[in-house]
Amino acid sequence: MTVQEVAVAVIVPLCALYAAWLLIGAPARRRVAAWLAAMPLPAAWARRLAGTAAAASACGCDGCDKNEGAAATSAQSIVRVHRRLH
């Protein structure tokens, strides 16, 4: 095997795992992080995974029920569209 083949054999699976991690939903990501945090890993990795596995925080989006204040503070705003004259 050449150095290029070894580099590809290492980089491609890591990139695939990273892409999968970003594309899965938050509940599945928390489940995977909790499963990985239970494994014998270095302390820094275990702390980061434990933080990811913790319950989601209220980020201010409407996608979760955790943020009860977002619905109360959101107000309608008027959007004005102006035509451009050439």
Image (spheres, grey):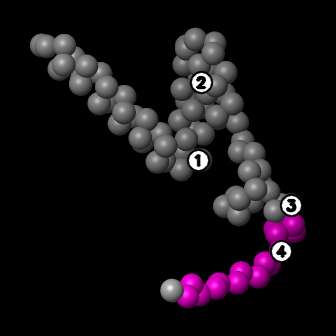
- Residue 32: x percent and y percent? 53, 35
- Residue 68: x percent and y percent? 83, 61
Q: Compared with residue 72, is residue 12 higher up or lower down, i.e. above or below?
A: above
Give the number of the disc on residue 26: 1
Q: Nearer the viewer, mark 4 or mark 3?
A: 4
**In terms of secondary structure, where does tag 2 sit?**
helix
Label 4, label 1: how many angstroms apart (C-alpha)?
A: 27 Å
Q: Earlier in the sequence, mark 3 or mark 2?
A: 2
Q: Horizontally, is 58 left or right of 53 in the view? A: right
Q: Nearer the viewer, mark 3 or mark 1?
A: 3
Q: Earlier in the sequence, mark 2 or mark 4?
A: 2
Residue at 64% from the left image edge and 35% from the top image edge: 53
Q: Nearer the viewer, mark 1 or mark 2?
A: 1
Q: Which residues are magenta?
A: 71-85
Q: As shown in the figure, which amino acid type bears the numbered disc 4?
A: Ala
Q: Nearer the viewer, mark 4 or mark 1?
A: 4
**In terms of secondary structure, where does tag 4 sit?**
loop
Mark 3 residue crowding within 10 angstroms, few (<14) / some (14–19) / many (20+):
few
